[in-house]
């Protein structure tokens, strides 16, 4: 059952508990397979993603030590000398290091900032062997990760990969609830997430003096299916609510902030939101963030779901593969050549 976790909360008619209008969903019963929990959790997810596009999950079962560990790895990576990080600058597969100072080019309807984003990040995806079919034909988004030398950052690669595998497994366990929330068979999405294209970002937001229209990351929506952000003690994430007001995401200890992205919005024919959000630069403290961007495999067909269309609700978009969609989005927002030029 959803339950109040912070002091300021209101009870919504659906039964969800809302903290500052952002729902909190407790997954404990669902993950234990308790009778009726699939339908109940699906209903809560549906209400959250149709009304807000964001929710907070507790009872998720991801070990606290694993969450603390990935934050520590993010700090270890970004504490390195700049020349060590730049040596891993983004490659043609968008894996590696992205430097500070990238000008945001997010869609204009949610972003009018005129200053560069103040965050640096390390990106990695699923680790595939060179002989893997995805790698063998040198597909753009299935190329090799880039890693610091083991001697330079002992254990980094092993721990980051372990966390990636943990999150890949955990997020896939939620797919039946997401499917049922859209009136689909529980197994509907599972084939699309075999050998998925999910990726992990280890971000660092340095403390800076507050300025007008300056962001750690400017207002945007996520391109992927769903995003899972473990919460830390340093605030910064804000969500644009349906009334267009920006709201701080409340810090609920041990939780994940979760949002749906453009892929799920497109799949659901805009039944589920892809809500704009942003991160403010921290003041007086460094902030680290480690979002896990859940995504289907490259050949997954993103076509209007049969339960999300009808005589008065025609499909809004043409079918597209996930590879086709993420190529368009990446070219508009994360051109690796631009990043290489910035880092040079």
Image (cartoon, grey):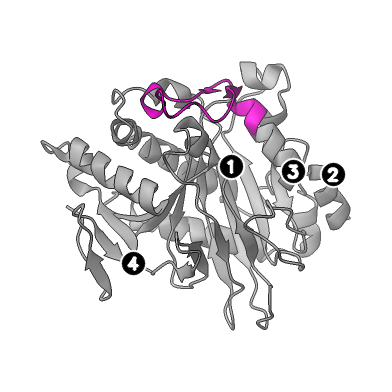
Mark 2 secondary-structure assignment: helix
- The mark that comes first in sequence, 3 or 4, is 4
What residue is at 57 percent from the left and 59 percent from the top?
Answer: 74
- Work out how far the residue at label 1 is from the one at label 3, CA to CA, in angstroms: 11 Å
Query: Pointer 4: what residue?
Result: 253
Q: Residues within 10 Å of mark 1 (few under 14, many from 20)?
A: many
Q: Is residue 37 above or below residue 121?
A: above
Q: Tell me which label, 1 or 3, sits earlier in the chain.
A: 1
Quadrant of the image for the C terminus?
Answer: bottom right
The disc label shown at residue 223, or none: 1
Residue 332's disc number: 3
Determine the secondary structure under disc 3.
helix
- Earlier in the chain: of badge 1 and badge 4, it is 1
Assess whether mark 2 and mark 3 are in contact (beta carbons under 8 angstroms): no
Please tell me whether residue 13 is drawn above or below residue 113 in the rendered image. above
Q: Earlier in the sequence, mark 2 or mark 4?
A: 4
Residue in the foreground of this view, choosing between 88 and 291: 291
């Amino acid at each position: 059952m959803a339950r109040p976790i912070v002091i300021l909360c209101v009870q919504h008619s659906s039964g969800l508990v809302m903290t500052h209008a952002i729902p909190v969903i407790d997954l404990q019963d669902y993950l234990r397979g308790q009778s009726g929990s699939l339908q109940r959790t699906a209903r809560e997810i549906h209400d959250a993603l149709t009304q807000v596009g964001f929710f907070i999950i507790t009872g998720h079962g991801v070990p606290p030590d694993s969450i603390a560990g990935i934050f520590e790895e993010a700090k270890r990576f970004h504490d390195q000398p700049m020349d060590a990080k730049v040596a891993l600058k983004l490659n043609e597969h968008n894996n590696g290091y992205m430097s500070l100072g990238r000008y945001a080019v997010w869609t204009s309807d949610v972003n009018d900032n005129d200053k560069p984003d103040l965050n640096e990040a390390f990106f990695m995806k699923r680790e595939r062997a060179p002989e893997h079919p995805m790698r063998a034909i040198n597909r753009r988004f299935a190329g090799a990760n880039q890693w610091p030398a083991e001697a330079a950052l002992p254990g980094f690669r092993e721990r980051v990969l372990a966390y990636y595998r943990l999150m890949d497994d955990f997020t896939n366990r939620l797919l039946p609830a997401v499917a049922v929330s859209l009136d689909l068979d529980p197994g509907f999405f599972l084939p699309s997430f075999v050998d998925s294209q999910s990726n992990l970002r280890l971000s660092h937001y340095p403390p800076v003096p507050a300025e007008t229209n300056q962001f750690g990351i400017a207002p945007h929506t996520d391109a992927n299916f769903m995003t899972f952000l473990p919460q830390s003690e340093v605030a910064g994430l804000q969500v644009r609510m349906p009334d267009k007001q920006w709201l701080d995401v409340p810090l609920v200890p041990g939780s994940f902030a979760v949002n749906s992205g453009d892929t799920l919005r497109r799949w659901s024919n805009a039944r589920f939101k892809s809500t704009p959000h942003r991160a403010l630069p921290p003041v007086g403290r460094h902030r680290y963030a480690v979002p896990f961007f859940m995504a289907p495999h490259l050949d997954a067909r993103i076509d209007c779901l049969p339960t999300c269309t009808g005589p008065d609700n025609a499909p809004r978009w043409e079918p597209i593969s996930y590879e086709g969609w993420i190529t368009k989005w990446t070219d508009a927002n994360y051109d690796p050549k631009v990043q290489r030029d910035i880092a040079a």
